[in-house]
Image (cartoon, coloured by chain):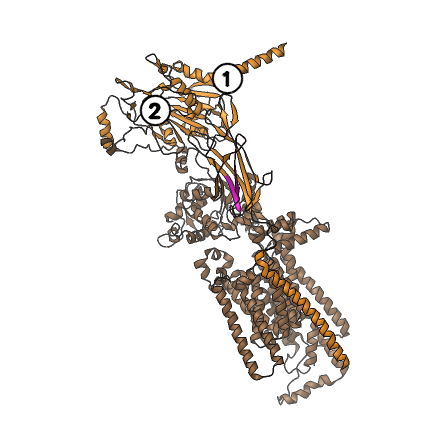
Amino acid sequence: MTVLKLPTFSPSTLTNAASLLRILALAAIAGAAISSRLFAVVNFESIIHEFDPWFNYRATRVLASQGFTEFWNWFDPTAWYPLGRVVGGTIYPGLMATSGVIYNILHALHLPVDIRNVCVLLAPGFSGLTAWATYMLTKELKDESAGLLAAIFIGIAPGYISRSVAGSYDNEAIAIFLLMITFYIWIRALKDGSVLYGTLAAVFYYYMVAAWGGYAFITNMIPLHAFVLLLMGRFSHRLYSAYSAWYAVGTLASMQVPFVGFQPVQTSEHMAALGVFGLLQLIAFVEIVRSYVASKQFQVMLRWFLVASGIAGGLAIVGLTITKTIAPWTGRFYSLWDTGYAKKYIPIIASVSEHQPTAWPAFFMDLHMLIFLFPAGVILCFKELREEHVFVIIYAVMASYFAGVMVRLMLTLTPVVCMAAAIALSSLLDTYLSVEEPARPDSNGVDETSAPGADVPAEVTVSKKKKKDVAAAAAAAAAHSAATTATKAKTKPSATYGIFGLDTRLVVIVNAIFMLVMFVLHCTWVTSSAYSSPSVVLASRRPDGSQNIIDDFREAYYWLRQNTPQDAVVMSWWDYGYQIAGMADRPTLVDNNTWNNTHIATVGKAMSSSEEVSYPILRKHDVDYILIIFGGLIGYSGDDINKFLWMVRIAQGVWPDEIKEPNYFTPRGEYKVDDQASEAMKNSLMYKMSYYRFNELFSGSPAFDRVRNQQLPREGPKLDYIEEAFTSENWIVRIYEVKKEDPLGRDLKTANAFDGGKKRKPSKPTSRRRALTA
Amino acid sequence: MQPRLLSWLGIALTLLVAPAWAKSSTGDKVLIVTDAKLEMSDYSQFWDGLRSRGYELTFRKTSEDEPATSAFDVPSFSHIILLAPSAKTYPQDLSPQSLVHLLSDRTQPTNILFVLQPSTPSVPLRDLAREFGISFPPPATPLIDYFSAVSPANATSLLLSPPLSQHTAGFESGKILYHGISHLRSSNPLLVNFLNAPPTSYAADPLEPADAVVEAAASGGEGLWAGGRMGLVTGFEVLLGGGRAMWVGSLDLFADAATSIDGEATANNAYALALAAWTFQETSVLRIDAVEHRRISESAPREQYRIKDEIIYRIHVSKFDPTTGEWVPTSEIEDMQLEFTMLDPHIRTALKPASEEGWYEAQFMAPDRHGVFKFIVDWRRKGYTALHSSTTVSVVPFRHNEYPRFLSSAWPYYLGALSTSAAFVLFCALWLLGGDEEAKKKKTQ
């Protein structure tokens, strides 16, 4: 029984048409994914965004101009001055290598594309590939229709767009694609028990290791999957060969990345993979022995052997950890389990906004309706619970937890949410778009009597049955794909459940379409309004609605580039290190690669101490200029005074005797910059630099900080050891020059007082009365 | 004939000039600022001495505005002598601030010789002296010493014998007549002691009894301005490329009248000229001409070295020779050091004079630590020009292909890899052979 009569086509036409439609749909999805990421380019310009991308861009330029071996051996003397940075050994080169390859290919084809544009457009390009990889993976879970839905979801979900808009040239840009393709190939390897696919998964795993520090997620997801399968008693030779191939090749390959080195055999994060590998060998050995030995006692003995060796292996790992042969868990790891850990012990991690726990609205903001469909999809996975479904369930659980702990890890949650939501929505659509109607139960309401009734349409003729398959297929193809629906119709010709009538179908389908439309609108809106800002250039609206571009950062960086000597060292808080290196091309003390906590704490100490204390630190580090961000004039809240407490905390971590956080609060525990500000606050270099000459803007009336909403003291701070060199148009960036030692050997405060016309107190010879009277 | 005559004349002139004292290392224009009260002819011997050494003298009263010490921020004179000006205020270009500015100009420093009034230095000079770390006793308290006085009746005119030093070349020996004030020096390391007060001297009003001074000091008032640590003549070497300043407490040191006392000649003129020679950067002037660094096996310098490289660092130092007016390479410095610094010195080694005159060199192995290092030579000795040189290079780790290829400690791993490979080949061979037999068995079955 069907609700609608559909036109009939030959099966080959249908499959051809369906696959053509799929290809077209995938192409359209890739187009949508790429174009929605171009808001940033359209609204602003083709520019590298934010902070880390600036370093990646700079590194890529070195790679493109000097070749890979020079890049590999690149020592950057301008970063972390004067420590320098061995760039080749401290980065994941996958991103730069990818851009370099694309750049070289384009140039080999005589397409003279600027390396910057390759970098800017890399993330959107890879998002198209991510959509394809997600399609393939979801196809393995359910069918093509779910795959296409998952592809469009991942294509425009803001959770992923936030890290992959044009210009957001960061490791995540290619890492999510690699994550999905590695998982897909792992599932394929597991399904087929194929060593070839296992090896291929290892190759992509290697690419992932070379591209993103988040590879540890794969390193633990796949072993966890294998382990859960073992616990479920699903050991198979397919699992054995897929996992062994992946682990052996993948681990060896990952150790070839200089930054990773011997970590895969030495750190705790990688031990799970090794443990599962060992466990699989043991189980495989036991299986082989069991197949040759019949004795029951022997099997019991074997089981004990298995358990004992498992425990021994576990103890060995624990023992090695205790003896420090295996590096213990890092602080970053602990902070994943205890959200308060980082704030207590590693302020440098906690100071990064993307390491904060996620706020609940962020889930809706980033995933919209998918977050509601997600649990339904996971439950549907439980219904089938094949090996790949187990994988998705584990992935869903782990990623949900991590996304709750850290805003940044929303990124890893997004793909599984898209997949699960696609499964749920596709099941819904399958049910409601199917033209099949269930058999009407008889008045008796007994199942047995209903069966003959259901058999009636199937009985009619063989040709009719074929026709029905065809019709169902056509209906499915209209929305998604044919094959599985058709097979379902074949296997369950007499469904006892289903939807009656067109009206119910329409209500649900229209509702679903409405939700999808809202989803697209939401994604577009979030992408254009929240995630497409380069943060190098700020945009605001004037009262009349026109756009006002605030370009202070570039103004200041170009000032540095044009007006200071090439080797002038610039000190700033680490957030701006990469931008200074990238845009101003000047050496910096610290940057966003926060590898040396002491060096950052040194900068923190210099910023939070008084001038007299800071000056020797500045001179010791050859600092010529200090750059700070000040938002008090136009209300830019991400400025250095708001980050100041982190500087204090990080400095306090290294010099607890000299820098004390409570000193920077008022006696009542408030963080103030006005008259009540504490002495330590008012004397700190950061405070002085921020508000130096700020009063003069207000011509007599007290100055007002629009970020803190506080009135400043009537008398502004005075500077003796540094002098103002540059202040940008909206005062966002202020640059100070560090004075050289006084030529007459005085301290600079005295020298400054002398220049200001003040007289020094005369000194007298110390009385040596005793010597005289003796 | 004409050109030939001229050239002969030229040669004759150079022969005449050459043996005489030549000019200073920084320039020969001298501005002398003084008060209307002073008669310049009273100091003619000093002026003649300067002129004979090639200086052009320009005189100016403190009441005048011209000639200015600098025009458009470019100094007009190489040296200034402030000859005991007693005015309360000075023109703008002679204010304490502008004088310090002139002294510390890095590109073209002006040297200044301060000569103070006999008993009471003027207020601007007192204020300025404090910036150098020099303080004066209360007004109208000249230096008194009954032990080295010319006559007991005149205890403020002292006969002193300044120590001989190479900074006062040209002054061989003799006594000088000193009539003026003493000053107190701070611990500023840039001060150079030229002449100290006699241990038995003190600064006081000569009309007051000496006991009053002790009592005043004991009651904690002005302090006791007495003893050998008080300075009479003090030089000042401005940091890093600046000029030199000299504070002389006695105007009479330069006067014609003091060149002889009771018919006996004093060394005043020679000493005054020697002081002027140091101040005007004739004597004890050194400079760094060149700095070289390279790997021991190479000839060209590098911008970056590798850790554990053998590095040679060479520096060339010249000394100004005032007799010829030329820079002469000098190897007389024996205590120069080289520091290879990143935040802290990682290597500190002696720079030994090399075989070539003027060159000093040090050879060392770069530390096993990568980073941005500086070769720093910072040689500061009292009276000499400070030598400072800083060259930045980076020290990089081994390149990927510079590590040793085969390690003896890795033999277990090599053996492991080889044995596994061999076992794999063996296994494959056995497998292939064994497979054939099974197929045969099947066939036979």
Label 2 packing within 10 angstroms: few (<14), some (14-19), many (20+): many
Q: Number of marks in the image?
A: 2
Residue A582 visible: yes
Q: Give the extent of the magenta segment.
A: B355-375
Image location of residue A705, percent across then percent down: 44, 48
The chain containing the residue under callout 1 comes to: B
* Residue type (three-letter) at the residue carrying disc 2: Pro
Q: What hue represents chain B? A: orange
Label 1 packing within 10 angstroms: few (<14), some (14-19), many (20+): few
Image location of residue B128, percent across then percent down: 38, 29
Q: Please determine whether, in this image, residue B2 is positioned above or below residue A173.
A: above
Residue at which label 1 appears: B19
Q: Please determine whether, in this image, residue B13 is positioned above or below residue B168.
A: above
First along the sequence among labels 2 and 1:
1
Residue found at x 74% / y 69% = A17
Quadrant of residue B252 in the image?
top left
- Nearest the camera: B231 or A575? B231
Image location of residue A249, percent across then percent down: 63, 64
B284 inside magenta stretch: no
Q: Please determine whether, in this image, residue A58 is positioned above or below residue A208.
A: above
B359 inside magenta stretch: yes
Is A281 situated left or right of A703 in this image? right
Residue A201 visible: no
The chain letter corresponding to brown is A
